[in-house]
């Protein structure tokens, strides 16, 4: 009986280890950037400001830029050796009204080398119609066009100065 239990335990562990499944959630308490991934693995996620350095908060000057950066994205389903990511970027105001609604910024590209698709960046220009003193919600969604269930969603509220 002990041998059967041990065998079943080992088989269960083998099945779990052989799955190519990755899911997780992460939140940066300084910037408020929250990132969830399902199917993909990612090494790092962070905000950069107009000077292209990591931000320690979510404050952004008017007439500048902010970007969500995802590094080390892996587990694309490759087709002819290329990765086919999709990248959606939306910005809404406090009332939920869209300021920016780009459904797929990578729609016109014919695939990427996996090393190039491993780093994706969604950049928002903070300008008209945005206003100083207001908060805006930025949402970036990355998905695999060959394996739709692979997805990363990054969200942050930015305070425009």
Image: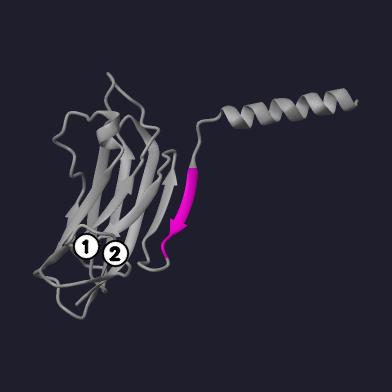
Query: Does dot 1 land on a helix, a strand or a loop?
Result: loop
Residue 143 among magenta residues: no
Circle 2 crowding by C-alpha within 10 Å: few under 14, some 14–19, many from 20 = some
Residue 22 at x, y = what percent? 49, 40
- Magenta stretch bounds: 23-28
Q: Residue at x 29, y 22 (%)?
A: 79
**Left/right of residue 5 with respect to residue 16 in the rendered view:** right
Q: Main secondary structure of the magenta part?
A: strand
Residue 37 at x, y = what percent? 42, 46
Q: What label does residue 110 carry, if any?
A: none
Q: Nearer the viewer, residue 55 or 28?
A: 55
In the image, is residue 43 above or below residue 13?
below
**Which quadrant of the figure has residue 130?**
bottom left
Residue 26 at x, y = what percent? 45, 56
**Which quadrant of the figure has residue 78?**
top left
Q: CA distance from mark 1 to mark 2?
A: 6 Å
Q: Are marks 1 and 2 in contact (CB under 8 Å)?
A: yes
Residue 88 at x, y = what percent? 24, 48
Which residue was labeled with disc 2? 55
Q: Nearer the viewer, residue 70 or 37?
A: 70
Q: Residue at x 21, y 62 (%)?
A: 49
Q: Quadrant of the C terminus?
A: bottom left
Q: Residue furthest top?
A: 80
Q: Quadrant of the N terminus?
A: top right
Which residue was labeled with disc 1? 49
Q: Residue furthest bottom?
A: 133
């Amino acid at each position: 009986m002990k041998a059967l239990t041990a065998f079943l335990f080992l088989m269960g562990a083998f099945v779990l280890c052989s799955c190519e499944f990755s899911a997780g959630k992460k939140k940066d308490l300084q910037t408020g950037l929250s990132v969830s991934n399902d199917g993909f693995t990612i090494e790092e996620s962070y905000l950069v400001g107009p000077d292209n350095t990591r931000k320690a908060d979510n404050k952004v000057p008017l007439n500048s830029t902010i970007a969500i950066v995802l590094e080390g994205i892996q587990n694309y389903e490759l087709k002819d050796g290329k990765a086919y990511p999709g990248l959606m970027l939306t910005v809404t105001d406090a009332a939920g009204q869209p300021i920016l609604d780009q459904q797929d910024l990578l729609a016109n590209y014919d695939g990427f080398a996996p090393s190039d698709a491993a780093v994706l960046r969604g950049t928002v220009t903070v300008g008209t119609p945005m206003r100083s003193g207001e908060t805006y919600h930025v949402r970036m969604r990355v998905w695999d066009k060959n394996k739709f269930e692979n997805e990363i969603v990054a969200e942050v509220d930015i305070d425009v100065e």
